[in-house]
């Protein structure tokens, strides 16, 4: 007696006609349903995304790995990248992009205006620009403060015995 319902094929069973299409088929169908202009826009967006990833990894391996930024190392860079990837799929981001896309699709329906393919792209571009700017500010602040807090003589009461310190 099989524990699986009739609608679910068992392991090793031949796929039935009611089985949902594979991901590759769905992607091909959606790509084929686009106009030439939409395909060009989509390919451009994916190209920019790939280029930004290449630029990020070049920065990682050319600047971060050799010098470790004296306190900011490879581990922090990899952690920031993976947390950023996870953060991209937060529910608030997905819902904001989905709501904007659905609103514009509804407004443009029957007008002949192009479909809104770039909401997610431009949302992520704007969001990541803010993150990069804040990160650059942190790096500048770290460079400015690092020398002052890493002074080898700071906190050493025996090195400056002529002055009275609160630590002594």
Image (cartoon, helix red, strand yellow):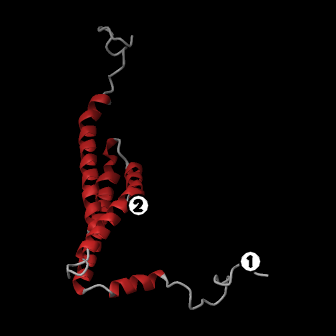
Residue 81 position by quadrant: bottom left
Residue 27 appears at what percent x and percent y? 40, 82
* Residue drawn where x is 68% and y is 84% of the image: 6
* Residue drawn where x is 74% and y is 77% of the image: 3
Q: Nearer the viewer, mark 2 or mark 1?
A: 1
Q: Which of 117 and 151 lies nearest the eye of the viewer?
A: 117
| Labels 2 and 1: the sequence-earlier one | 1
Q: In the rendered view of the protein, which quadrant contains the C terminus?
A: top left
* Residue drawn where x is 27% and y is 78% of the image: 43
Instruction: Count every numbered label the image shows and give the total.
Output: 2
Residue 118 appears at what percent x and percent y? 26, 70
Relative to 24, is 145 above or below? above
Helix or strand or loop: what does disc 2 sit on?
A: loop
Residue 84 appears at what percent x and percent y? 38, 56
* Residue drawn where x is 28% and y is 51% of the image: 131
Q: Which of 85 and 16 lies nearest the eye of the viewer?
A: 16
Helix or strand or loop: what does disc 1 sit on?
A: loop
Label 1, residues with CA under 10 Å away: few <14, some 14-19, many ≥20: few
Residue picked out by circle 1: 3
Q: In the rendered view of the protein, which quadrant contains the N terminus?
A: bottom right
Relative to 138, is 83 above or below? below
Residue 117 shows in this picture? no
Residue picked out by circle 2: 89
Relative to 163, is 63 above or below? below
Residue 26 shows in this picture? yes
């Amino acid at each position: 007696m099989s524990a699986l319902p009739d609608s679910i094929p068992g392991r090793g069973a031949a796929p039935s006609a009611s089985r949902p299409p594979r991901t590759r088929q769905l992607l091909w169908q959606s790509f084929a349903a686009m106009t030439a202009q939409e395909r060009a826009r989509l390919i451009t967006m994916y190209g920019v995304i790939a280029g930004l990833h290449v630029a990020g990894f070049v920065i990682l391996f050319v600047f971060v790995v050799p010098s470790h930024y004296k306190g900011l190392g490879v581990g922090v860079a990899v952690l920031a990248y993976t947390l950023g990837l996870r953060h991209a799929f937060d529910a608030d981001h997905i819902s904001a992009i989905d709501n904007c896309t659905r609103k514009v699709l509804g407004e443009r329906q029957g007008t002949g205006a192009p479909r809104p393919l770039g909401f997610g792209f431009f949302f992520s571009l704007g969001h990541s620009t803010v993150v990069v700017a804040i990160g650059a500010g942190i790096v500048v602040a770290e460079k400015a403060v690092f020398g002052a807090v890493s002074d080898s003589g700071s906190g050493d009461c025996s090195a400056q015995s002529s002055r009275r310190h609160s630590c002594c």
